[in-house]
Amino acid sequence: MDRKTSRKRLIILLVCLVVVETLVFAEGGEMLLGDESDGSRALSVHRINLTAEDGQKILVSYDKQPMPFSTRQTCGLCHSYDVIKKGWHFSAGDPNFAGEHDGRAGEPWIYVDASTGTQIPISYRRWKGVFDPNDVGLSRWQFTLLFGGYTPGGGAGEADSDKPEEIMRQFVSGKLEVNCLSCHNGHAGQDQAQYAGQVKRQNLRWAPTGACEFASVTGVAASQPDTYDPVMSDAIAVKYHKEAFDEMGRVLLDIVREVPAQRCYFCHSKKDITDSDSGKWAVDEDVHLAAGLTCVDCHRNGIDHNIIRGYENETKAGANSLAARSTCRGCHIGSDSSVSPHNGRLGAPEPKHAGIPTIHFEKLSCTACHSGLWPRQRTRRVKTSRAHSLGSLGASKSDDVLPHIITPVFARGYDGKIAPHNLIWPAFWGALEDDKVVPIDIEIVKQTAGKIIGKDMPPASGDWTDITTEQIKEVLGLISSQKSVQGQAVYVCGGKVHRLTDTGEVVTFENVAAKPFMWPVAHNVRPLTQSQGVRSCEDCHATDSPFFFGDVEVDSPIAAERKQTVKMVEFEGVDKIFVKVFAFSFVFRPWLKFAALLCCAAITLVLLFYGLGVLGWILRALAKQDKDA
């Protein structure tokens, strides 16, 4: 083989290696040390060096002005950061992944401004009924400042802004990286309230450091000028606790593989504000937690962090192999098509549902009977961590504070089955064009509605500022006169759209944009003895049963509309006349049972009478034969 041929072959080999490497990294990069388990169930010890965002190791003994550690640079040494950030909790605000595995609708983010009469569900997910934050004028950086404290970072928090004024602020605040410690830090000193507070101060690059147990952060990025350089100034300072580091400058992180439920609670708590006995000491846990399970026993994930959400047909939205086995049906009943039996998974009792007609399982979800608050004649309200900043410093403890989340609302879900839902009625200023209503930029709304509605101080409770029809008329007229929006200016609230006629009067009409947004209730799960129907069929089928005939509150900032309600049956997609007539059958059902028993007794007596007669005839015939013989 000559030198020229060898050189050609070498070039071809190098090109092939480059192509292969490119393809590998295109699929998420090489597997790193911590990406794949060797099978041991023992806890890995994380005694490691901390690394700043510039890649430099943090040396507590020598650095006079240490920088906050970067999770991308620190955790990313052993774990594939770029794979992790595609996970469910992080990808929603990422333009490259939003919409890819959205699946069934979940709790949205809710933008609230009482001074403009605004309460609007927003999300980067492509769920029907929510609006993209960009639609209301929120950039990803603004979204992060509003809601980032109740995310584990990543997503919108790492997106580059395309607005000049925000680019400078991002340089000051840094980006909100995926905070691995939000979930995986097992130390009691991990303070998510501090994390949320750092985000509010625009201390994005400092948030993970400020929340951990071995460091503290002072200073406020929001008050620094655009020219602030975090490397050259100590206006925002990090103080590491030197006793937490060993002689080699390493810190021992209390990392746990199975995330404890207490870590989930900061973002996933809920409080019933309609019940006087809603204190933590008076509320029972979900039956699964009471049985010893934890959140991650069901909501599992691998290195891709594609966490199982636990609803039927979830496999259509994601590739998690355990998704089908982690639903109510998957754990309690299993599947006949599986190679090995899965029913009774994690000790789940197999339900018999003796005496319940099978049509219930075709029309109802498991949660319809077993999850959420027990229904009453009128719906109740709840506060959630993400909507009301539960657990953060300075969070309002008022029961009336916006947003108003209504529950339980029994409605048809994504799969056509009736299930309990949380509900929020949107309220926002929008533009009507071709029968489609889109929100108006919040800055325009503040300059118009804010001047008219916001001139009155909102209630200290955080509730709605009472809006009148005259104020709506004035705001719509002001928006129209400024020619700042395309289409006709309208106001959405209370399930209706308000607009001005040619004569200057306010009229209302129905539109899909005014419909409430609902998301399913999964927890808390009640035990068998507290499920609907356990007492009798009348739990659901009485003529006044809340399941069908309960009153659903219609929330509105217009004071005159606040007593309006909608019957539960309106959300269930069933014929209300049929349901009412069917319910009346249960009123007379005891009489029918008594009548049926009487009829059975009469028939029995008749049969007995004729049976005895036949028996007598037979005996007489036999006796005659004996006599003749």
Image (cartoon, grey):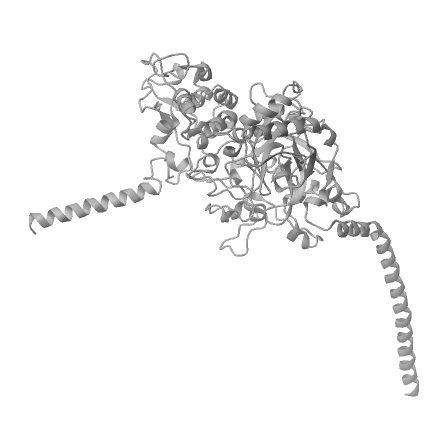
Residue furthest out toward the front: 503
Identify the residue at horizontal 37%, vertical 29% (top origin).
72
Out of 288 and 111, give the one closest to the viewer. Answer: 111
Identify the residue at horizontal 79%, vertical 43% (top origin).
544
Out of 424 and 161, give the one closest to the viewer. Answer: 161
Relative to residue 544, is residue 89 drawn left or right? left
Q: As displayed, is residue 300 above or below residue 471?
A: below
Q: Position of residue 114 (x, y in %)?
A: 62, 24
Residue furthest out toward the bottom: 629
Asked whether residue 468 is in view, the answer is: no
Quadrant (top left, top right, bottom left, bottom right) of the C terminus: bottom right
Residue furthest out toward the left: 2
Relative to residue 199, is residue 65 drawn left or right? left
Asked whether residue 461 is in view, the answer is: yes
Identify the image quadrant of residue 376.
top right
Identify the residue at horizontal 73%, vertical 32% (top origin).
561
Q: Report the number of numbered marks.
A: 0
Q: As displayed, is residue 376 above or below residue 591?
A: above
Relative to residue 235, is residue 377 drawn left or right? right
Relative to residue 569, is residue 592 drawn left or right? right
Identify the residue at horizontal 52%, vertical 56% (top origin).
337
Q: Position of residue 573 (x, y in %)?
A: 68, 49
Out of 497 and 14, give the one closest to the viewer. Answer: 497
Q: Position of residue 146 (x, y in %)?
A: 52, 25
Q: Position of residue 301 (x, y in %)?
A: 46, 40
